Amino acid sequence: MEQLVPAQLTSAGRAALEEDETQVATATRVSLCDRNKKLLHECKEGMLAVTTHHVWWWTPPQPGRNPDEAHAMKLPLQRILKAEAHSSLFRREPRIDLFFASDPSAPLLRFVFRDNKCAEVFERLQTSLARKNWEKPKQVVKRESGFNTQFAGVGGVMRRQQQEREQTANLTTEAFSDLKQLLDSASEIVKLADRFSSAISQNQAKAQAAAAAAAGGSSETVERKQEDDFFALLNDMGIANPATKRACGSRYHEELARELADFLAKHLKRHSATGAIALTDLYCLVNRARGTELISPNDLYQACILMKPLGLNFVLKTFESGVSVLQSISLNDDTVSSRFVELLRDQNDPFTARINAVSVASAFSLSLQLALEQLKTAEKLGYLCRDETAQGVDFYLNLFEHVQIYDEEAPPVPPPVPPSH
Amino acid sequence: MRRNVGVARAVRARKERDAYQGKGAELNRANLEHFQTQMAAFKRELENFAVKHKKQINKDPEFRNKFQNMCSKVGVDPLASNKGFWAEVLGVGSFFYELGVQIIHVCLATRDANGGIIQFEDLLQYLRRIRQRAGRETQQISEEDVQRAIASLEPLGNGLRTVKVGPRQMLVSVPMELSPDHTTVLEAAQTHAGVLSIPVVQRDLGWSQERAARVLDALQAQGMTWVDKQTKDGVPAYEFPSIQLNLM
């Protein structure tokens, strides 16, 4: 057990991967045994994930509980000496034994599988162990250091740049020569592509400015700019551990819900000022981030329904018009209502202070419709009272809750204390 | 005799500067050309690679992830399939789901400019151009394909709606519940003493006629504005009683 180190889950209860880490296999209902092959009581039937760098094991957090309380551990792959898979007709549960350098003769750790993922997990684990991704990737483009008269002066700069160009051209031919090569140089390619595209777009911006100054902008550069913007949306949003139906089985929608919650926690601000996003927009963004592992509209919807029962930070809300949005729970009815009350109390006289859809919409940067809806909800919950006038509907603090009604039969009650100003 | 003074020096200095600048520009041009050819090469190679190694890519989640990462950096749309080129290669799901993602993507990318209302013809043109980027002879997508793709998004609620404005089909991607437009118009009404018209909104906010009309009509449906169709110049005036009364 000492091989496993405590690990951090994301706020939605998934493995918090490192930057270059990719999840390659998952299994549910996996239990842990120690060196005496005894089942560890606190490690029964959890989630297992194999990544390029670790084996993760955790119990998904309970709804409403702090994710830090979840039991999560990981094992750096570099510590594993070898792995063996065992399954037989007579034992019901297939298992994977892990051996460590400290004792090559006996397994110190055993994973017992209740679902049918053992073979797949084992295959991926072997691949990850063989690839040794934790070792530093080799540098492909090297820059000559040290002074050399060949590279001095203007001619030198030109010669050096010429040499760099040749090197990157070589990289392209080499990298795409076979699968393993491309895998090894993938991050190099990404870096180069980043550098190239920013240089190209800078140059385009310059050309565009020049063209605009000369002739009011050509349609071609405008089109290209639009396309760049289009692809800019794709950048830096990738999901390295997409939940898949194949890997998660019956837990697919739950894992998807957790994935969405993590994704929104990270990216919602960039796409929505209001803390709410239409499911259609989300469908596009999350599928772009997943690349080719598309989720269907129906699966997305099913996952959204689960967010509330799972206690995640977002809830599905469907308006009367049929528009569905995911809302951050910071927008829940009671919180928003108390923000309205605060807004009213901040005004001078709580008896005459009033708000309406427009003032609320601009104060909290909500849409008019959403503002109106929230006001009506606050009214329903007893926080506000409406006043319908020719100028429109205004909302006041609900002061009736401070008023007591005298019952003549009942013994006299002391007069009510007016609310403090 | 002293050198390096007077007119001769200034002329020489300028010549030198011009020479350096010329060299600099030459270098930049050479680099830029190189970058562009390399990017094109990346793109071509990625596509060839997908064809050649589709089995391994599909089987290997790590590689799949890296591959996608490269695609997005190099500007290859992994969904720009030819009713299935990439779909076939990478086993991507249904063509209409993919097209759905691309349609919403176009809506998102153009939203700043059009407020979430796009004409069908523009949408189609955009989609065709994006799909052509993948460098294959693209199967033409039709308006019907787009309609079917939108219909396939039905489980996601009414976030996308097609509306007919006169003879033109438009796709609205920002539902009223999430649009800041109505608040913006009410704010504009305040600077115009509580009276607006479609042309005024267009001019003030730089919106299309459709966008302005849509927002004003929605506000009318909510009872926030009344329409006076009998104005002197024949342009309907939208009166905002709440603002006018407040100004009195």
Image: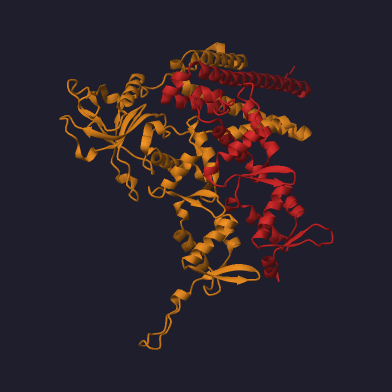
> Who's the residue at 24% across and 31% down the image?
A112
User: Can see residue B117?
Assistant: no
Residue A280 in the image: state x and y as whole percent. 55, 43
User: Can see residue A79?
Assistant: yes
Horizontal relation, residue B74 to residue B26: left or right: left
Q: Chain B is which colour?
A: red
> Who's the residue at 47% across and 68% down the image?
A382
Q: Which residue is situated farthest in the top direction here?
A: A150
Residue A160 in the image: state x and y as whole percent. 56, 15
Check the image and report above or below for B208 versus A151: below
Check the image and report above or below for B196 versus B93: below
> Who's the residue at 43% across and 82% down the image?
A405
Residue A211 in the image: state x and y as whole percent. 74, 31
Check the image and report above or below for A347 versus B197: below
Q: Which is nearer the eye, A95 or B150?
A: B150
Q: Which residue is situated farthest in the left direction here?
A: A36
> Who's the residue at 49% across and 66% down the image?
A380
Q: Which is nearer the eye, A372 or B33?
A: A372
Check the image and report above or below for B174 versus B60: below
Horizontal relation, residue B207 to residue B45: left or right: right
